Image (spheres, coloured by chain):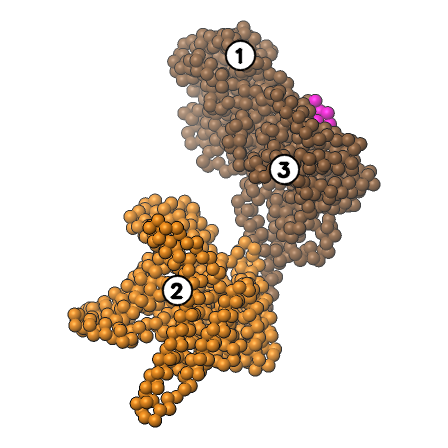
Chain colours: A orange, B brown
Amino acid sequence: MSVNGVTFLAFLLLAVILYYLIPKGVRWIVLLCASVVFYLSYGWSAGLYLAVTIVLTYAFSLWLGRLAAIHPAGETAQVRKAQKKQLTHKKRLVLAAALVLNFLALGVLKYGAFFVSNVNRVIQSFGQEAFPLPAFLLPLGISFYIFQTSGYLIDLYRGKYPPQRNILRYALFVCYFPQMVQGPINRYDALAPALYEGNAFDWANLQHGLLRMMFGVLKKALIADALAPTVQELYTNFYAYPGSMAFLGAALYCIQLYCDFSGGIDLLCGASTLFGIPMQENFRQPYLSTSLADFWRRWHISLGEWMKDYLFYPLALSKAFGRLTKRARSVLPADVAKRVAPCLATVIVFLCVGIWQGPGWANIAYGLWNGLWMSLGLLWAPVSSKLFHRFSWKREGLFWIVWGVIRTDLLVIIGRYFSNAGSLMSALRMLKHTVTAPGFGSLNAQVFSSVGLTWATVLPICAALAVLLCISLAKERGVQVSQWICQRKWYVQFLILFAGLLLTVLCVYGNTDYVPIAYVYENV
Amino acid sequence: MSGKKWFALFLAALALVFVVWAALNILVDPFGVYGDVLLDWDSYTQTLNPRNSKAVYISEHFDAYDSYVIGSSSAASYEPEELEKYLDGQFYNMFHYGADPEYDEMLVSYLLEHDSDVKYIFLVLGLNEANAGHSDNTALTNHTYYKVTGESPLSYYTSFLFASPSYAFEKLSSWHQDTEMPQTFDVFLPDSGCYDKRLRDVESIGSLDAYLEKNGGDFVSPQATGAQLKNIEACVEHVSAIQDMCDDAGVELFVVLSPVCQQQLEEYDPASLDQFYRQLAQEVDYWNFSISSITYDQRYFYDSTHTRNATADMVLARMFGNSDLYYPDQFGVYCENGACVTAEELEASAREVLGTPHTANVPILLYHHLSPADPESGTVLHPETFARQMELLEEQGYNPVDFDDLIAYVEQGSPLPEHPVVITFDDGYLSNYEYAFPILQEHGYPATIFAIGCSIGHYEYYKDTEYTLTPHFGQPEIDEMLASGLISIESHTYDMHQWAPFEPEGALIRGNLLPLESDTEASYIAAVTEDAQRQRETFAAFGIPESNVLAFPNGMYTTLTDVIAEAYGFQVTVTTDNTRVNTLVQGLPQSLVDLGRLNIDEATTDQDILNYLAQ
């Protein structure tokens, strides 16, 4: 069931009506049933994978919960310390087993073919026969629910909260349908209360939910999907155009990806709001970031925070990294030495972010591109601070903000050469083509038209982008647009609603010419 | 505002959106369901959904028509104008997209029920009718008029009310791009129900190889052969039902199995074809044109499933015994009283006919001014050279013919002599009379002079100026030449071969028939049409028979020029392209379009001429 279709709207309407019709205590069952129906609409086999993950992680969660409930009861402090250490060791083993199994499933299904193809490349160079490439089904949302369940297990290990003992309630946490298409990666402690408590009907939720859904649908249809053919052409046949067009392709891909990903999140967060269940925000005007670190705090926030909490800190604070810092102090100035461990952790984290995006060396390169720049940023920070202090520059000045935004977006755009080029070689060739043959002189209307950029296509996209930019700037200044709209006079609200609905109905749901493209992160 | 009130506002806005949506579809009316009051563009609505739009159109024009062509797009080439030459009915072509005999039956039933004075039903079948069943396509582009299908009016009108707005947007966008000529979005002639073939039917046709080189993609052999026709029973049943309805209503029914192209024929098992022929013969009398010599000549088809309009004209000529129009031997068999022929028999006779040539290569020579005084300059030729070249033709066994001979060859199938050649002169110089005419008379050779209308009788000056020009012949010369029966005078335009230095300063100069940069399509059509009209009047004033051959000044033209020329009655157009081999095809008037000519001047050697003639 495509979430961009009328069927999904009908399904959602039915689920919302049922949810509020039945007693509060059992409302979560409606959500569970709706989630099962939604997920099974993508096929039974995908459902089977999901069910195995739910049962497996549920079993491990109970085990971890039981271990967490054991309190060392030795007579002496020394005995209790030894018992605690043993218990911690056992918990660690259980968690490790759970995570290994969880990520093994993800690894085999998502990266199996990539791994075998690389093995084949090596053995073929020795004249050996290649292994057949495995073709596993990649269940919808696997990269999201594996991370979500893993985060849950790590939190249990850390004793952040007790495990959910009701397997059906736990299943709902894992497969709550608005998060299944492309996240966000929700945290149990943030999501569970609203998920289980049976929220009372609130007109405000309906209002904000519907507005956000409409915004998301339009963002995807009018910008992301409208740009998709041009981006596809520029990435596929970049050699046929001046190199500057390849850069344009990467820049447009940044816009497409943001509107696609955040549009989908808006639609599904809006849908979740209808049930009174807030999901984690995933974006905060990422292209207005003033540094790459800032960008990653605004882009795919739920993944970034997951990586920070469950990978970066455990790594940076680990004994091994502590030893590394000590060793660095012996050869480097103290100010630099203390940054070596965070830098290395950053590189590893972003390597994982790259791998998370999908199999392929290009994704690994994408991760490294970000990780290395972030690490350089960490190392540069003290120098930068001194410079600002020395010349009395103000970081909040317009020049530095604009410079920061341009510099960051430039790095993001170059990074997107890797994440969308199909292969590392292709990305490198495209980059080379951009630099060595920009061909500014041969840019003309015909070139733009041949990639689908005519006045007729560009003007509506620009108009939509202008609206999006205004909304983003308003949000940046702390204005909640949906609230702002709701505070206008009734006729202004009516006009805005009418315009939005007119576009939604005539350009999206009622228009057979518009065929939604699958979300970029729908199958990662 | 409370959330409750906001939601009420939301619902109101949503309701208004649906009202706007419905209003858009009613006003723009892409399917012509609600009267199409805004754009009144039947050609567009028929192109989008001919089933619905034609039925709607005919329901409003029953008084104008009393006879109907029924069938799928294989019936498209049967033009009412041609049918009306043989039958005293007012025809409308109701053809639709997609073979669907069940729909044909529904349509005939509707027509007989609602049009009280139907005279003829002309049912055209192709092999697709015997292969495809009733279309289950529920798309709006296939949705049919409720009075034909029996659907409830409410269901019919509401299904179009909330049609995808893309249809309305597309119609508005097409309206913006609309031109005089048909485009992919307006290919129908609403008055006749036929395709507007003005562009396709002026595409020059020559040798088969050249045709296939250009259009080979439309004639791809099937991947598999020997398929069975899957819908014979149902197809014959529906045809039988149509006959019963016609009999009951006293309406004359013609059933025609239209010509089939080789590539389509190859797809089916001949035994299956025989079964279709046989079962059809058991139910109705019909004309079987499916396999004939033209099956193997793709030039008679637009593509592997659609016959040319000219081919349909041949079918009608054969059916109604019109000996003035060419059709090949053994073309069409009338199957009556249950008798029929087999595919094998048809193929054998087609192969036999293929042994007889139905094409001819005709080179055309082009001369201009002849002068003994200044033989070196430009296109001027010494009269002695001309005389020698005429002797050369005679020595080499070439037989000069005129354009009427070519037209007769193509249209009536009249034979041409061996090694035909056409002699032409451009511009209408006096020297053609003074030097060429006597030589031609000596040989008894016919020739054609393409005269510029505004220059006829201008012996000294260019039009109304004081600029001197090479003398052009006038009334006495015209009278004498025409009286000889050897010389025909045809059009080189009235005034579209202007000489810029002699024209008033700042005036728009039309040195040839190419559109000017400042021309719109409409202004160009108006200019060319007006010029043709003035030429016609001038010729009439000089006692020159109406011209049906046009030589493009400087040999330059566009497709639109051809369309205008065809519409104005020019059956032949000639260029100055000496690489073009003029292959005339009997039955295809398009083979007379844009013929090439060899321009001859003093630099042209005898060998050049012989090489050209031998092409």
Q: CA distance from mark 2 to mark 1?
A: 82 Å
Name the kind of residue labelled 1 in the image: Tyr
Label whose residue precedes the other's in the sequence (1 or 3): 3
Percent x, y of residue B397 = 53, 10
Q: How many marks?
A: 3
A428, above or below B365, in the image: below
Q: Which residue is mark 3?
A: B226
Q: Is residue B322 part of the magenta span, yes or no?
A: yes
Residue A78 is situated, as x and y percent measured from the top left of the image, at 30, 90
Is residue B415 something that shows in the picture?
A: yes
Mark 1: secondary structure: loop
Q: What type is the residue that disc 2 sits on?
A: Trp
Q: Are marks 3 and 2 in contact (CB under 8 Å)?
A: no
Describe residue A353's horizontal placement relative to residue B137 as left or right.
left
Please check whether the numbered discs 3 and 2 fall on a single chain.
no
Point 29% across, 48% down: residue: A436
Label 3 marks which chain's residue?
B
Q: What range is drawn magenta here?
A: B318-323
Magenta span contains residue B235: no
